[in-house]
């Protein structure tokens, strides 16, 4: 028989795992949306935009945090739109994280 302490520990571990999974999915979705946003600015075709978004998601695995994604998007956009700033990209990343979280939550309800 498991004790109340074991049950609480298991519940906390489950909650932590679900939270981590949700956050991973949200950041990945945000990166995809960010890639699609940048692809639109770059004037890429649908297939090119999809590939660009995929590469944006993959760029997040280079190092912990968002700096690798920011660097990629900033570098690519700077070529096509020199007036773009890192601040604008960070703001877009924050905005799209909210969108991504709501999309993931909505999908989880289905």
Image (cartoon, rainbow, N blue to C red):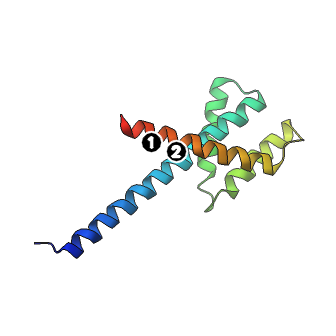
* Extreme residue in the left direction: 1
Residue at x 60%, y 40% (from the top left corner):
32
Q: Are marks 1 and 2 in contact (CB under 8 Å)?
A: yes
Tell me where residue 67 sits by quadrant.
bottom right
Residue sitting nearer the eye, 28 or 101: 101
Screen quadrant of the C terminus: top left
* Extreme residue in the front direction: 4
* Extreme residue in the right direction: 83
Residue at x 67%, y 47% (from the top left corner):
93
Determine the secondary structure under disc 2: helix
Check the image and report above or below for 3 versus 23: below
Residue at x 75%, y 52% (from the top left corner):
71
Residue 18 visible in the snapshot: yes
Label 2 packing within 10 angstroms: few (<14), some (14-19), many (20+): some
Tell me where residue 3 sits by quadrant.
bottom left
Check the image and report above or below for 81 versus 22: above
Residue sitting nearer the eye, 9 or 27: 9
Residue 52 visible in the snapshot: no
- Residue 27 position in % (x across, y down): 56, 49
- Residue 62 position in % (x across, y down): 63, 58
Residue marked by disc 1: 105
Q: How many marks?
A: 2
Screen quadrant of the N terminus: bottom left
Checking the image for residue 101, the label placed there is 2
Label 1 packing within 10 angstroms: few (<14), some (14-19), many (20+): few
The reply, left or right, for residue 110 in relation to residue 45 is: left
- Residue 30 position in % (x across, y down): 59, 44
Check the image and report above or below for 68 versus 28: below
* Extreme residue in the top direction: 45
Checking the image for residue 29, the label placed there is none
> How far apart in space, not on screen, are marks 1 and 2 (Cα)?
6 Å
Determine the secondary structure under disc 1: helix
């Amino acid at each position: 028989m498991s004790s109340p302490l074991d049950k609480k520990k298991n519940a906390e571990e489950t909650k932590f795992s679900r939270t981590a999974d949700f956050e991973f999915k949200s950041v990945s979705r945000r990166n995809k949306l960010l890639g699609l946003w940048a692809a639109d600015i770059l004037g890429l075709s649908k297939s090119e935009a999809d590939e660009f978004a995929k590469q944006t998601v993959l760029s997040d695995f280079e190092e912990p945090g968002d700096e690798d994604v920011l660097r990629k998007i900033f570098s690519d956009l700077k070529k096509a739109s020199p007036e773009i700033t890192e601040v604008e990209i960070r703001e877009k990343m924050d905005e799209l994280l909210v969108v991504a979280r709501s999309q993931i939550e909505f999908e989880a309800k289905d």
